[in-house]
Amino acid sequence: MANVIDTLKARGLFDNWTSPDLYKALDRPMTLYGGFDPSADSLQAGNFVAIMTLCHYQRAGHDVIALVGGATGLIGDPSGKSAERTMLSEEQVARNIAGIQENLSRFLDFGEGRGQARLVNNYDWHRQFTFISFLRDVGRHFRMGTMLGKESVRQRLASESGMSFTEFCYQTLQGYDFLHLYDAYGCRLQIGGSDQWGNITAGTDLIHRQRDAEAYGQTLPLITDSQGRKFGKSEGNAMYLDRNKTSCYAFYQFFLRSEDADVIRYLKAFTFMPLDEIAQLEEQVKAAPEKREAQKALAEDVVRRVHGEEGLRQALQATEALFGGTLAGMTAADLLPVFADAPSCELPAAEVVGAPVTKVAAASGLCKSAGEARRLADGGGLYLNNERVAPADVVSEGQVVDGQLVVLRAGRKNYRLVRLVK
């Protein structure tokens, strides 16, 4: 099997390393870890770089540890931040960790024995320290000059908001995490985003001084789109792996909307698709960009791995619904994100159920009048839940999705979402 570093470089998942000796060291199985900040109860698309990197290491036969920051999450990592984070309660952090563990189980093989991933919570060891014992046993091994020289620290100290003592100490906690995992599991490699360089080297330096051993760090690139925007955001909204936060449809659409200039990089980074197949898709992007074959392959692959075959089916059905496909079997939760950008209104349930569709179309504003709606229906251009209606048809109770809404359409693309209220 190829060295995992070669794989990561070929797929755009490699930024830097603390020593090129790592390449040779990876000829043998190595234990490594990557950390996840429990600032929310679900990971998001922006975490894919770290997740996929851990997956590639596990596939190459290395032992993977996923660390959730139950302790460090109570403080907040200052790396890449212009202001101090909002403090979370212990209860919030515990809920978030449970959600992250579920997310990661979709990608990594957790279990006992060689080759199985392990999930750890750094609160389990940090809670054993008192402030004085941490300063005596750990803090004395960190030098102020080195800590002040970290890029994340220098940027914050130069900013208007400055940096609190709490945030300044964050690197000592993450550095000790690496030392603890080295002692407990023989962990010799930490991966993290490029903004984690200072925290990672704090750990490698601590292991070198305390154990006279070499440990390594590998950073991951910041993935942006062709406009320089951070990957994983959609108009300011995070794309969460929890379908209750981001629907399967919205997740699918996020990847389907990838620009031609970005889609091949995303296929390499966020799928396990063979590089020769990706090369073929790249040729299709050049030859027939309007078909969006690469975008479809990307969206289907990612949604299938995140939400399974059923999630992909729902996403494809919802996508079809937007273009006139059947709404049969879809719930209100399925439909709301599909028609989130369509005009909507609220009407009393008593004025919808049992009323002529033409009257509802006029009341909703889809048509200017009931007469216009009747003429539209007479010509075959009025639809209820994507089913063509006749001028005399009425809205039945069974056509109201989850007792909450109906979807009207005039012509091919003019939609109106009607929410029923009491």
Image (spheres, rainbow, N blue to C red):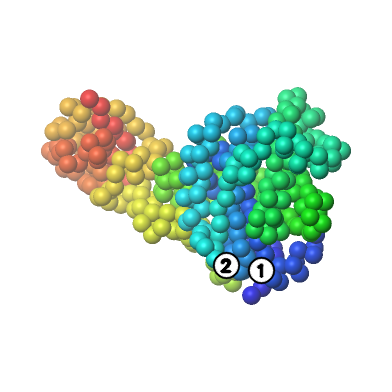
User: Mark 2: which amino acid?
Assistant: Arg
Category of crowding for the residue at label 2, using alpha-carbon neighbours closer than 10 angstroms: few (below 14), some (14–19), many (at least 20): few
Looking at the rendering, which quadrant does residue 235 occupy?
A: top right
Residue 18 in view in this figure? no
Where does the image place residue 40, in percent across and percent down from the top left? 52, 39
Quadrant in the rendering for residue 311: bottom left
Q: Which type of secondary structure does the marked residue at label 1 adopt?
A: loop
Would residue 213 appear left or right of 230 to someone viewing this image? Answer: right
The x, y position of residue 342, in whole percent, is 38, 37
| Residue under the point 64% across and 75% down | 1
The amino acid type of the residue labelled 1 equals Pro
Residue occupied by mark 1? 29
* Mark 2 residue element: loop
Q: Nearer the viewer, residue 15 or 334?
A: 15
* Residue appearing at x 29%, y 33% in the figure: 418
Residue under numbered circle 2 = 114
* Residue nearer the viewer, 110 or 150: 110
Drawn side of residue 48 relative to residue 325, left or right: right
